Amino acid sequence: MAKTVLHDVLQAGVEEGASDWHFREGKNVSIRISGNLAEIEFLSPADFLDKAIPQLMSAEKVERFHRSGDADFAFLEDGVGRFRGNLHRERGRLALSLRHVKGRVPPLADLGLPETVHTLAEGIRGIVFVTGITGSGKSTTLARMVEHMNETQQRHIITIEDPIEYSFEDRNCVIEQREIGLDTISFESALVHVLRQDPDVIVIGEMRDRTTFETALTAAETGHLVLTTLHTNNASQSIMRILDLYAQAERESVRRSLSASLNAIVCQRLIPRQDGRGQIPAVEILINTPIVAKLIYENRLDKLPNAIDGGMEDGMVSFNRSLYRLIKSGTISEKEGMDASNNPEQLRMNLSGIFLDTDKGSIISEG
């Protein structure tokens, strides 16, 4: 009965274009549509989640929840679609958050992402970070990159995910998807062995700790392409997050390695579309050019935004440039663009037709 009710709630939400559902015992269900939360007329009975959860999660995931108080999982609801979930407690009661995962990986144009994303997936070695807050579309962008390789190249791709969101069918690539708790006990365990499994590409669902980063770095340094995500807002913050994993005395060595192995950082923020048809990403793309590598090695991270502004010829995009294009095309409103901008005054100048050139030579020589 609980599973049938859940099916109906999810189906109704999907038909309305919902991306997320939030269930709490004794509360109405909340859903998120185009970034906005709204309540629906369904009260979660006290035993609703207790009855539904065993039908959605494996016994191992249920055991993990009882041990730690949290558990991530994914499931396929017949006739509705695939969902990613997190079971947790709030004020001593069960709570469940679900996100709808599209059954197929959308084309690049449908995602509103630049062609540079595909170009980065064609790299032979190095690390590509896709970053943003929770719900910004990082997993979908990674999936798009994997699917592009699957469509155009012959590679052995190993993904390590918690949980698996998109399922891939081999086309030109051999794709192995390993789920934490089902195929391996932990990210750390999977990463210890992954380099012995002859991968060309390693996809790490989330860069969680120092061990994960060091394995990714070793893989990149030994000729593998690594794709992964970080919960950071921009390129500079992404580098700082990695450095924060290390003691001060170790950071110069880390910067040297990162400056040599980094391919790119793609940061994204979802902005509501002006036509009300969902959200579209604004992106910041940092490409590791010689200038960028020098700035990272010399710890001049405050100059990275200038390098991005001056790197259009190299495929770099600043958030403001991305927002400018979305506003000018009528895709998003000027207000939404200003609210999302790191530098609204500069964006206002751009919209007025004023652009300040950034000289590459000055980026290197300053400081």
Image: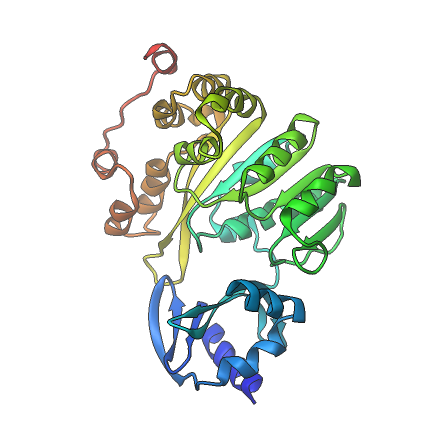
Q: Residue furthest bottom?
A: 1
Q: Quadrant of the C terminus?
A: top left
Q: Quadrant of residue 22?
A: bottom left
Percent coordinates x, y for residue 121 in the rendering: 61, 38
Q: Quadrant of residue 35?
A: bottom left
Percent coordinates x, y for residue 54 in the rendering: 61, 77
Which residue shows up at 36% across the image and 38% down it?
319
Percent coordinates x, y for residue 205 in the rendering: 58, 48
Q: Quadrant of the N terminus?
A: bottom right
User: Height in image: 259 above or below 158?
Assistant: above
Total of numbered circles in the picture? 0
Mark yes or no: residue 125 visible: no
Q: Residue furthest front?
A: 67
Judged left or right of residue 224, residue 258 is left
Q: Quadrant of residue 216?
A: top right
User: Height in image: 364 above or below 154?
Assistant: above
Mark yes or no: residue 170 visible: yes
Which residue shows up at 70% across the image and 27% down it?
222
Query: 295 or 257: which is nearer to us?
Result: 257
